[in-house]
Image: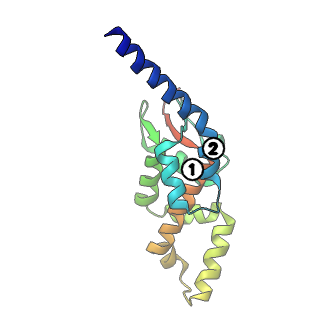
Amino acid sequence: MDLKITEVIKKLDEADNLRKNSQKDLLSFCEDKSFDIEKRFSVWEKHCLKKESGSILDKKDFKSKFIGYLVSIANSYYERRNEITYETLFDILENEDDVYIKIVNLIPELKRDSIIESILKDRFDLDEYYKSEEFQKKLELRLKEELIQENFGSYTIDW
């Protein structure tokens, strides 16, 4: 019986080492923009070990202004000891009123692309465009890309 337990533990340790050693390659694939973002995000979400923090993070802790802004909203909504995950950021993006206006102003190339696209499609009401499913999908894809780049997993509102 002890021999079986030892064998199981050995196999688990080997699997854990394989997972740890494969993280660099997995993250490298996920960051490679020559592959579809949905596929890369799926791999990142399921298999990559993400950065996690036991204490509160602030927007200054992120290179991404997009993630930083969503984190600042999360910090104002949630109370101490709540865990904020990357899924929380998607919820904020989807449910927060007028969040898209602030995000567009934070990311100049997104604003520029929106203006160009609205002109090309003869849509001159940018507010209407920002509320469209098409634009919401662009924001979602952008958030996925930036989450991969930051490798953000979660943090706890605590100090």
Q: Position of residue 47 (x, y in %)?
A: 49, 42
Q: Position of residue 82 (x, y in %)?
A: 41, 34
Q: Residue at x 64, y 75 (%)?
A: 113
Say if 17 sits above or below 5 in the image.
Answer: below
Query: Callout 1: 10 Å neighbours few (<14), some, many (20+)?
Result: many
- Please state which of the two labelled residues, at mark 2 or mark 1, is closer to the viewer: 2
Q: Residue at x 51, y 58 (%)?
A: 39
Quarter holding the N terminus is top left
Say if 145 sits above or below 121 in the image.
Answer: above
Per the image, the residue denoted by label 2 is 25
Q: Nearer the viewer, residue 118 or 127?
A: 118
Query: Callout 2: 10 Å neighbours few (<14), some, many (20+)?
Result: few
Q: Furthest-left residue in view?
A: 1
Q: Position of residue 48 (x, y in %)?
A: 53, 41
Res. 80 image quadrant: top left
Amino acid on which the number 2 mark rests in the picture: Asp
* Helix, strand or loop status at disc 1: helix
Is residue 73 in view?
no
Q: Residue at x 61, y 88 (%)?
A: 120
Q: In terms of sequence position, does the residue under pointer 2 or pointer 1 come before the other?
A: 2
Rendered image: mark on residue 147: 1
Amino acid on which the number 1 mark rests in the picture: Leu
Q: Is residue 53 left or right of residue 87?
A: right
* Helix, strand or loop status at disc 2: helix
Q: Nearer the viewer, residue 75 or 47?
A: 47
